[in-house]
Image (cartoon, rainbow, N blue to C red):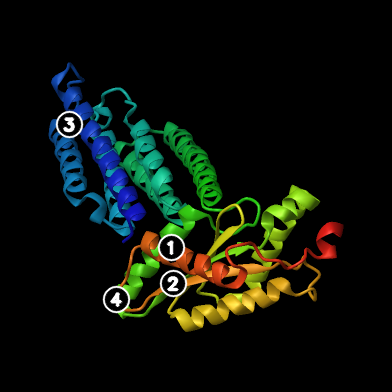
């Protein structure tokens, strides 16, 4: 179970405990404060005890309870509301109460946390439970009207809360994606890379497989921007990202970490295989065959083959390898490869 799922389970348990604890307190107050003489006290005491017990179960279980368990808890909540309706005194000649409205507590909670199919089952259960409850109370011809009104409220409330919840979930998912994505290239950003590295590092610790990083930058990127404008520089970056998608394996991760710098995370790759992948990317980036702007790339490779290192340590080694390669090839200066004509036209 990942951290996010655990947090959601804890949140669901905590709020469920508050809901059932509140139901227990409200029912207890109804017994302590002045009430109809026809009220079935043992029945309401059972509701107080049952609600308190469910609250305690949720407190103790916390995020360990799965969704089937929560569905059972919610169904028991429906049962407790039905017992409260039967016990409010109407069956013994007292006036009709409004305990049916507490079905809304149950369905709002279910609509917020359960998916559509599970929620539909809970609404159906409420419909059946309330129908049986009205049969026990026997309020006369008004029973059908009461059932339709309450189930209409329950169904409408479930639909509205579920739709609002799904809308909020989609907004949060979109925000999370945007926070992990480089807007220009569509690749992951530094945050996404860190998350992917943590996952791959954990896997590598279990399997003993190596992990490689390739740090890449564009040759003479400043000259591209200065001579042809930032739009041309953006097109060059997008072209490199597109070639990465073509060259990399399905398990590889590419990220733009700033400016003209890219970082490749290559699971189950040593220095030799990572270098081979980087060379294929360099060849593809310099090619004119796909219509994209040809650019020169420089890269540095680092790999952890005898135990997992930190991302920062690997990046430092990859950066040092990149610097040494540039210094050996160009004497510390930028590449002297001339800028291509297609760069100016695109």
**Who comes first in sequence, dot 4 or dot 2?**
4
- For numbered disc 2, what is the local secondary structure? strand
Q: Between marks 2 and 1, how big is the CA–CA gap? A: 7 Å
**Residue position for label 1:** 315
Q: Between marks 3 and 2, how big is the CA–CA gap? A: 75 Å
Query: Do residues under tags 1 and 3 come within 8 Å of each other at their CB atoms?
Result: no
- For numbered disc 4, what is the local secondary structure? helix
Residue in the foreground of this view, choosing between 133 and 33: 33
**Residue position for label 2:** 302
Percent position (x, y) of residue 243?
67, 70
Classify 10 Å Cα crowding around label 4: few (below 14), some (14-19), many (20 and above).
few
In the rendered view, does 137 fall on the left or right side of 330?
left
Residue that sits furthest to the top in the current view: 34
Q: Between marks 1 and 4, how big is the CA–CA gap? A: 22 Å
Q: Between marks 4 and 2, how big is the CA–CA gap? A: 20 Å
**Residue position for label 4:** 206
Location of residue 8 with respect to 29 vertically, above or below? below
Q: Which is in the foreground here, disc 1 or disc 3?
A: 1
**Residue position for label 3:** 40
The residue lying at 43 percent from left, 62 percent from top is 315
Q: Quadrant of residue 126?
A: top left
Query: Do residues under tags 2 and 1 come within 8 Å of each other at their CB atoms?
Result: yes
Percent position (x, y) of residue 87?
22, 33
**Who comes first in sequence, dot 3 or dot 4?**
3
**Who comes first in sequence, dot 1 or dot 3?**
3
Percent position (x, y) of residue 98?
34, 27
- For numbered disc 1, what is the local secondary structure? helix
Using the rendered image of the protein, determine whether residue 159 is visible from the camera's viewpoint. Answer: yes
Q: Between marks 1 and 3, how big is the CA–CA gap? A: 71 Å
Q: Between marks 3 and 4, how big is the CA–CA gap? A: 61 Å
Classify 10 Å Cα crowding around label 2: few (below 14), some (14-19), many (20 and above).
many
Location of residue 60 with respect to 311 vertically, above or below? above
């Amino acid at each position: 179970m990942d951290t996010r799922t655990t947090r959601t389970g804890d949140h669901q348990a905590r709020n469920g405990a508050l809901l059932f604890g509140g139901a227990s307190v409200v029912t207890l107050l109804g017994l302590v404060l002045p009430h109809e003489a026809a009220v079935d006290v043992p029945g309401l005491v059972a509701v107080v005890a049952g609600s308190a017990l469910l609250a305690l179960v949720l407190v103790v279980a916390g995020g360990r309870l799965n969704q089937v368990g929560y569905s059972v808890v919610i169904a028991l909540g429906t049962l407790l509301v039905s017992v409260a309706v039967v016990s409010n005194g109407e069956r013994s000649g007292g006036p009709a109460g409004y305990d049916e409205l507490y079905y809304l507590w149950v369905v709002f909670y279910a609509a917020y946390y359960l998916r559509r199919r599970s929620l539909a089952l809970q609404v159906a259960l409420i419909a059946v439970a309330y129908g049986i409850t009205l049969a026990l109370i026997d309020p006369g011809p008004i029973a059908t009207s009461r059932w339709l009104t309450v189930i209409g409220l329950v169904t409408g409330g479930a639909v509205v809360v579920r739709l609002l919840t799904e809308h909020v979930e989609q907004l949060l998912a979109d925000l999370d994606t945007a926070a992990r994505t480089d807007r220009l290239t569509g690749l992951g950003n530094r945050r996404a890379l860190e998350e992917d590295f943590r996952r791959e590092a954990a896997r590598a610790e279990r399997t003993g497989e190596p992990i490689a990083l390739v740090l890449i930058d564009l040759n003479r990127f400043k000259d591209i921007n200065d001579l042809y404008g930032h739009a041309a520089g953006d097109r060059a970056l997008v072209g490199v990202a597109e070639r990465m998608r073509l060259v990399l394996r399905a398990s590889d991760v590419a990220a733009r970490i700033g400016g003209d710098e890219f970082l490749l995370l290559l699971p189950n790759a040593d220095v030799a295989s990572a270098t081979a992948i980087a060379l294929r990317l360099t060849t593809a980036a310099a090619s004119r065959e796909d219509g994209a702007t040809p650019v020169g790339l420089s890269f540095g490779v680092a790999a952890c083959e005898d135990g997992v290192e930190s991302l920062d340590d690997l990046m430092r080694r990859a950066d040092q390898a990149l610097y040494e390669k540039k210094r050996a090839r160009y004497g510390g200066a930028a590449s002297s490869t001339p800028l291509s004509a297609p760069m100016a036209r695109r």
